Image (tube, rainbow, N blue to C red):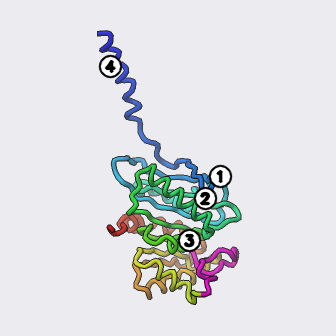
Amino acid sequence: MHSTLLRLISILCALPLCAAAADTGFLNRTVTVEGVPYRFQVYVPADWTPQQSWPVALFLHGYGESGDDGLLQTQIGIATAIRTHAAVLKLIVVMPQCRKGKLWVDPDMQAQALAALEQAVTEFHGDPARLYLTGLSMGGYGSWEMAIHHPGKFAALVPICGGVQPNKHLPDLHSSFVNDPKTSDPYAEIAKRIGSVPVWIFHGDADESVPVDESRKMNQALVAAKANVRYSEYPGVGHNSWDKAYSEPEFIPWLLAQKLPQK
């Protein structure tokens, strides 16, 4: 009788541990690439469960959120949308941070972002067929660059107020095709590399940081290539077009509907 009671007590004590909810919300993580540790954030929905595969978005922030604290990138952009629309944003969001003095078009910064993505996919049961890439401003440039160098990886691409040609404030911020002597039209070459990947471009027509012509030309190139592209331009909106973009009622349903074809 005594041994039976002890077993019952041990089972009851263990139950809260078994039933404990998984950590969700904004979580701190670190990934190490070539011996260098990088802090990043992962958003995990409140109803996350390991019993299913989850879509995963990789978010590339703007230049102002650069650093190594692993936090600044959660203050604007998609993180704001998460806090406002958490009930409908049913996906994992990976938010790496670009180091100060670096750019998302730099290979080492792209490497750490992709490593953070892969780590989160493994930890949180991400679906490799439903990986999405989005970024704003510097991250918009980075989104175009990452997409062309990693064909077949992302099921959808969402560049916001990004560009291709050198930025007037950051001359080194541009597509690698700009300096390629074999490429006469970098917009057309990017469109060709992106192929059939669904793309939704956003930009404000009063943007003084990244000219709206950058997105217009990229959209025109994708249309000419018969790509799967949507384009939203906001009249009178300046550089911050991301708040409106991530709040579009159709954005989340459109994003979650995209999936890589089975191989």
Label 4 sits on residue: 8
Residue at x-position 52% and y-position 49%? 26
Task: Find out whether the residues at labels 2 and 1 contact each other: C-beta distance under 8 Å.
Answer: yes
Q: Is residue 80 above or below residue 207?
A: above
Q: Is residue 241 visible?
A: no
Residue type (three-letter) at the residue carrying disc 2: Gln
Q: Residue furthest top?
A: 2
Nearest to N terminus: mark 1 or mark 4: 4
Which percent across, then down, holds residue 205? Answer: 56, 80
The front one of 70 and 126 is: 126
The front one of 45 and 232 is: 45
Assign the N terminus to one quadrant of the image.
top left
Label 3 sits on residue: 140
Q: Is residue 144 above or below residue 132?
A: below
Numbered label attached to residue 97: 2
Label 1 sits on residue: 69
Numbered label attached to residue 137: none
Q: Tell me the SS state at disc 1.
A: loop
Residue type (three-letter) at the residue carrying disc 1: Asp
Which percent across, then down, holds residue 111? Answer: 57, 62
